[in-house]
Amino acid sequence: MKMHNPPHPGKVLKELYLKPLKLTVTKTAAALGVSRKTLSAIVNGNAPVTPDMARRIGKAFNNTPQSWLNNQMKYDLWQLEHARPLLKGVKRLYRHDDTRPET
């Protein structure tokens, strides 16, 4: 089941980790070994969580990089599906024995 308009992972980071732990972006960025500008862009939803950042966040907050990357992927796919026109000119390619109906 698809999630309805998933939040940007930066918002999740801000709301579930930074705020409850009373962490500033500056302090968190220093702990993650990144610039304040980099982390600020993520928590404000202006930059994605990259694999490197997912690894850093996972280590700092004792969770998995995969969870952060999965959240980013869900966010990206939802945004893509709802904000951009359908892919025109793309034809479906199936093996000859595939019987899925064309949509």
Image (cartoon, rainbow, N blue to C red):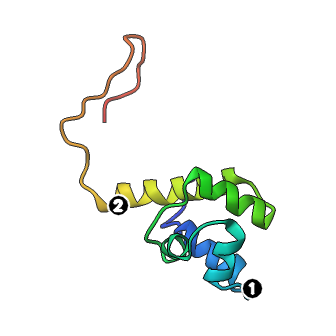
- Quarter of the image where one finds residue 56: bottom right
* Disc 2: which residue: 82
Amino acid type, mark 1? Pro
Relative to residue 91, is residue 8 drawn left or right?
right
Categorize mark 2 by other alpha carbons within 10 Å: few (<14), some (14-19), many (20+).
Answer: few
Q: Can see residue 66?
A: yes
> Which residue corresponds to the image point at 77% horizontal and 84% vertical from the top-left?
21
Which one is in front, 84 or 61? 61
Which one is in front, 94 or 21? 21
Q: CA separation, marks 2 and 1?
A: 31 Å
Q: Residue furthest top?
A: 96
**First in sequence: mark 2 vs mark 1:** 1
Which one is in front, 40 or 66? 40
- Foreground mark, 2 or 1, reads 1
Which one is in front, 12 or 50? 50
Relative to residue 76, is residue 67 drawn left or right?
right
> Which residue corresponds to the image point at 46% horizontal and 66% vertical from the top-left?
47
> Which residue corresponds to the image point at 71% horizontal and 77% vertical from the top-left?
17
* Disc 1: which residue: 20
Q: Mark 2 falls on what kind of element?
A: helix
